[in-house]
Image: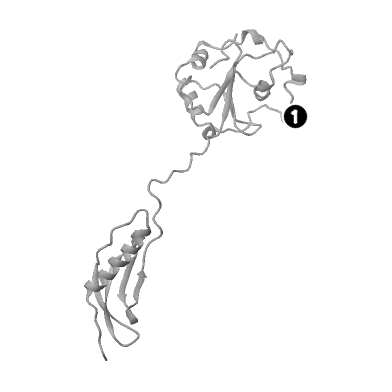
């Protein structure tokens, strides 16, 4: 069998010539890589030739040699998935779930310890931005312009009907509260609940009748110590 070997230098020279041709049309030409090794491979015409291993993009390895009739043959071997672009723009963070809460109290019966919890700076100004306070509300709140409970607050009074006060009520996207329980005993516990309302999600409070309507015609029941819109007291939190 007749053997025909082309020096490695000739292969590299051919590669450099090909790389130069591509570089002439490229905006950002890349340097020609150096061969990683060489081997002898048989050709279809019964001869053998020297092939060079060249590094390629994305972890590939190319086997390059001169084939029959002096044709340049490049075989790609292996390789990984395409390399992602450098410093890809990360996807935006999901919008956090919005929660709203209020504390309903009877101003004439709240204890000093309860008032301390409601006014503490431990939770005021330290709760997450997606947890919005709708106020510390008295047992009755009437808008002088309409004579009714303000519409955004009706659900709080409905949830607290006939239940012990003061009471913390938190709403998420659903019409029923995710939290409805008596005011926590400490400001630290109140902040824990406001930081993660879903972690403390509780069942419907006792004594609440599903068919009850605590605010008929938009007017909620009056108890001793009720207040009007003008004396909401601690509404801002």
Q: Is residue 74 above or below residue 147?
A: below
Residue 62 makes an appearance in the image: yes
The residue at the point 58 percent across, 18 percent down is 135
Taking depth in this image into account, of 234 and 39 the one nearest to the observer is 39
Residue drawn at (31%, 57%), measured in percent from left and top?
30
Q: Quick one: label 1, few (<14), some, or many (20+) residues within 10 Å? A: few
Tell me if residue 26 comes above or below residue 106 in the rendering. below
Quarter assignment of residue 221: top right
Q: Quadrant of the N terminus?
A: bottom left
Q: Position of residue 57 (x, y in %)?
A: 35, 61
Q: Which residue position is annotated with label 1?
A: 211
Q: Quadrant of residue 209?
A: top right
Residue found 41% across the figure and 58% down from its top: 82
Residue 71 or residue 200, whichever sits in front:
71
| Rendered view: 74 above or below 59 | below
Colour mode of the rendering: one colour
- Is 221 left or right of 99, judged from the image as shown? right
């Amino acid at each position: 069998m007749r053997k025909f070997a082309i020096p490695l230098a000739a292969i590299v020279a051919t590669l450099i010539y090909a790389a130069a041709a591509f570089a002439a049309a490229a905006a950002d030409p890349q340097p020609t890589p150096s061969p990683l090794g060489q081997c002898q491979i048989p050709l279809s015409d019964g001869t053998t030739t020297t092939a060079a291993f060249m590094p390629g993009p994305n972890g590939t390895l190319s086997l390059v040699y001169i084939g029959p009739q002096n044709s340049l043959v490049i075989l790609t071997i292996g390789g990984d998935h395409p390399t992602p672009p450098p410093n890809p723009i990360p996807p935006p963070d999901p919008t956090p779930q919005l929660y709203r809460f209020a504390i309903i109290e009877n101003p004439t019966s709240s204890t000093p310890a309860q008032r301390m919890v409601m006014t503490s700076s431990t939770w005021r100004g330290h709760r997450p931005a997606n947890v919005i306070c709708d106020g510390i509300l008295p047992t009755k709140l009437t808008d002088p312009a309409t004579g009714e409970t303000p519409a955004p607050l009706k659900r709080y009074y409905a949830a607290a009907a006939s239940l012990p006060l003061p009471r913390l009520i938190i709403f998420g996207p659903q019409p029923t509260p995710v939290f409805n329980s008596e005011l926590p005993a400490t400001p630290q516990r109140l902040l824990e609940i406001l930081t993660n309302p879903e972690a403390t999600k509780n069942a419907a409070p006792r004594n609440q009748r599903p068919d009850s309507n605590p605010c008929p015609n938009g007017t909620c029941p009056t108890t001793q110590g009720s207040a009007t819109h003008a004396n909401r007291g601690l509404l801002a939190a």
